[in-house]
Amino acid sequence: MSIPELPSPLGDGTRLVHAGDDPAVPGTPLRPSPVFAAPYHLGDQPPGWQGADGYARPDNPTLRVFERAVGELDGGDCLSFATGMAAISSAVLAVVRPGDRVVLPSDGYYATRVLARDELERFGVRVDLVATPEIEDVAARGDLDGVRLVLLETPSNPRLEICDIAAVARATSATGAVLAVDNTTASPIGQRPLALGADITIGSDTKALTGHSDVLLGHVSTARTETGRQLHTRIAAWRKTTGNTPGAFEAWLGHRSMGTLDLRLARQAANAAAIVEVLAGHPAVSGVRWPWRPQDPSYALAQRQMLRPNGVVSAEFADEAAVLQLVRSSRFFLAATSFGGVHTTVDRRAQWGGDAVPEGFLRFSCGIEDTADLVADLTQALG
Ligand SMILES: *Cc1c(COP(=O)(O)O)cnc(C)c1O
């Protein structure tokens, strides 16, 4: 009997449910259970005998399965980390040397800028902060002398600016600079930076990939190219030495949670599409951004470069008081930072002091509640 052809490529839901799977073995669980161990029995054999695990920090069975799953989605080789910042700091610090230049987004995740200011400059690395939409121009002008690493964040958090990954990749590959993309906002099924020419894609898996606001995780995936393989070896050595390995329980929880990412993103995006219309139609709200709204300045590039929408939206209210009023008057728009979880949340970014945004700038993360309930709640709360 011949097996009928399966669609190629497989859909996101199928890929997510089966990512990292071993062939079915009777009597074993559908997903391997976590292996809780720091050291493993060596018996009378030397470490590494026939691939046996010896100590969990460099590598362990639960991590390998989770990394295979995330790597499949990214189309690269994954290394998982304790947090998103552990992933970013490792990708940067494992690659740069004193005297190098590094290009980072001036409008991206604020802790990445703190890393640059407080740690990289101390080691003699020159940091150029460039606005996300302008990084493409810097690259196109060939202004990459001495640049060892370009890190993009697209869509950027929190303003949701977009940068053309393939265009920057053409410039970095011409000069030999490494191109890394913080792909947290899009998630591995929303955008594939490695397929667009990046050497490294990074995710804070604290956000949508795990999506339940209950775990910290991050990852780095490297391209399956000569450069990518060298970077992978370097970053794996860095993780082993600095000890940024996630625990087995977190890795297992990450793998368990990602199976529903397709469903969660679909609902979050549907909710965002509806919420954006309410916000854009209200006189108290301005500057609504969602890259999948046809009026958005990033719409054309998002359509070309990204694979699907998500639930992260930004908008401006008059001031802090207007935001507090919204939080008090609504039932489901919970004030909390982070994004990508099942709960709908709002975060007034100015309260953290890291982003150059107005006092009333608000990042919305649409959860998976019913669209009609969110629309009704927001409409009554805005008045
Ligand atoms: C949250 C976030 C990070 C940091 O992730 P943690 O898991 O909190 O360390 C990095 N980049 C972006 C774009 C983020 O949104």
Image (cartoon, helix red, strand yellow):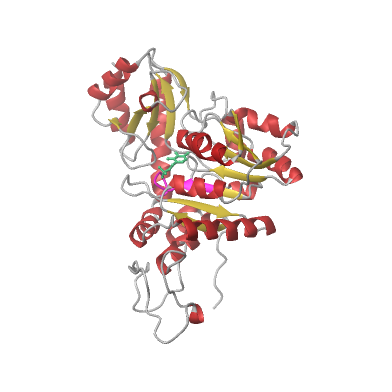
- The image quadrant that residue 363 belongs to is top left
Name the residue located 25 percent from the left edge and 25 percent from the top edge.
Answer: 330
Viewer-closest of 27 and 323 = 323
Q: Quadrant of the N terminus?
A: bottom right
- The image quadrant that residue 298 belongs to is top right
Is residue 351 visible in the rendered structure shown here? yes
Is residue 153 visible in the rendered structure shown here? no
Name the residue located 52 percent from the left edge and 55 percent from the top edge.
Answer: 73
Q: Main secondary structure of the magenta part?
A: loop
Residue 145 coordinates in the image, percent (x, y):
73, 37
Residue 197 coordinates in the image, percent (x, y):
66, 47
**How many numbered marks are there?**
0
Name the residue located 61 percent from the left edge and 31 percent from the top edge.
Answer: 300
Viewer-closest of 295 and 326 = 326
- The image quadrant that residue 153 belongs to is top right
Magenta segment: 202-209
Residue 295 coordinates in the image, percent (x, y):
54, 23
- Drawn side of residue 294 relative to residue 217, left or right: right
Viewer-closest of 54 and 174 = 54
Assess whether residue 207 is covered by the magenta stretch: yes
Assess whether residue 193 is covered by the magenta stretch: no
Residue 318 coordinates in the image, percent (x, y):
37, 13
- Drawn side of residue 339 relative to residue 289, left or right: left
- Drawn side of residue 215 relative to residue 87, left or right: left
Q: Quadrant of the C terminus?
A: top left
Viewer-closest of 250 and 312 = 250
Q: Is residue 347 above or below residue 21?
A: above
Name the residue located 64 percent from the left edge and 36 percent from the top edge.
Answer: 164
The quadrant of the rendered image in which ligand 1 is seen is top left
